[in-house]
Amino acid sequence: LAGSAAALAVLARPAPARALDIGATAPDFTLPATGGGSVALADVVKSSKYTVLYFYNQDFSQGCSIEAERFNQALGDFKAKGATVVGVSMDPMEKHEEFCTAKGLGFKLLSDGDGSVSAAYGADLKIPILGKFSDRQTFLIDDKGVVVGHWLERDGSMANVKTPAHTTQIIDAIGKL
């Protein structure tokens, strides 16, 4: 059994994705959104001073639930800074709708069913045996569509999402721009 556990640990090690660098143009996309219809990044960027685009693993998982709640609690602070929050995962739209209702979320979740948008942002996570997920990352995009902030859980640049530290980190970064 110990050998099996060690083998599984090696197999479950995520394949690293190549994330966008600060200064890069954010890849445009249109994805299905909660509440009906779809959302195009270009439209969000045009209508906001900043776009907070966060990728997360899975609806209803413990960490992702807390992360979504933290973003929701900080919506007023983001709006005060001219920022719109949008969440993306590879979960199907039906699951997103259930998650938004259960958590009372006041922002859109987008379904990246085939993982192509996650891949374009370097936020795709492939775990052998378990499958594909969106990797926990947050991008701050300005009104010109340029990435001006990036936080990644795996490299330690992202503050703890289970506390308000990560949303505070983003709000503070907006304040310095």
Image (cartoon, rainbow, N blue to C red):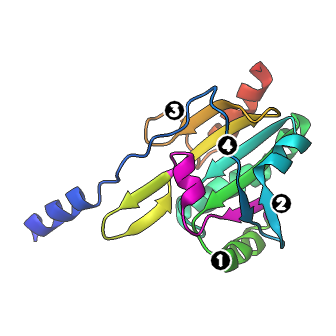
Residue labelled with disc 4? 164
Residue 137 position, x and y percent, is 56, 45
Callout 3: helix, strand or loop? loop
Tell me which label, 3 or 1, sits earlier in the chain. Answer: 1
**Amino acid of disc 2:** Gly
Find residue 157 and name its label.
Answer: 3
Residue located beneath label 2 in the image: 106
Q: Is residue 120 magenta?
A: yes
Label 2 close to label 4 by CB (< 8 Å): no
Q: Is residue 68 left or right of residue 113?
A: right
Expressed as whole percent of the image width and height from the top left, the position of residue 61 reads 54, 67
Name the mark nearer the viewer: 1 or 4: 1
Q: Earlier in the sequence, mark 4 or mark 3?
A: 3
Which SS class for mark 1?
A: helix
Kind of residue sitting beneath label 4: Pro
Residue 136 appears in view:
no
Q: CA distance from mark 3 to mark 2?
A: 26 Å
Give percent across and percent down for residue 47: 91, 44
- In this rendering, is residue 25 above or below 112? above
Task: Give the Cα distance between marks 1 and 2.
Answer: 16 Å
Residue at 83%, 34% in the rendered image: 143
Closest to the observer, 97 or 21: 21
